[in-house]
Image (spheres, rainbow, N blue to C red):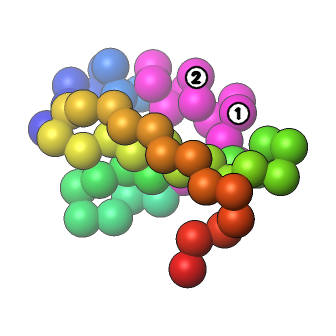
Amino acid sequence: MINKKLLILFLKFYLKYYKTVELVQNSIYFFKLKRNIFIISKIEGGKFKKTHFSKSPA
């Protein structure tokens, strides 16, 4: 699992930009809308991943 202090700093930084944060099965998802692009940022297994969607995923 990710270091708690690092995770808190990460959350504080990203919460400035992301409206919704959800913790699902030990994975953290960040959602935001920017210029009609729906973006999901995901932390899984200590690795940061970012996926871009032109439309809200089903």
Based on the picture, tell me whether residue 17 belongs to the magenta stretch: yes
Would you say 44 lies left or right of 32 here?
A: left
Q: Is residue 16 above or below residue 42?
A: above
Residue at 37% across, 37% down = 49
Using residue 3 as the reference point, say whether residue 57 is left or right of it: right
Q: Nearer the viewer, residue 35 or 11?
A: 35
Q: Which residues are magenta?
A: 9-21
Q: Residue at coordinates 40% horizontally, 45% vertically from top-left?
A: 42
Whole-percent x, y for residue 36 in the image = 83, 52
Check disc 1 and report the residue beneath it.
Answer: 17
Read off the residue under disc 2. 13
Q: Is residue 30 visible?
A: no
Q: Residues within 10 Å of mark 2 (few under 14, many from 20)?
A: few
Disc 2 to disc 1: CB gap under 8 Å: yes
Q: Is residue 50 left or right of residue 47?
A: right
Q: Does residue 38 sit above or below 8 in this rendering? A: below
Nearer to us in this view, 49 or 1: 49
Judged from the image, the secondary structure of the residue bearing numbered disc 2 is: helix
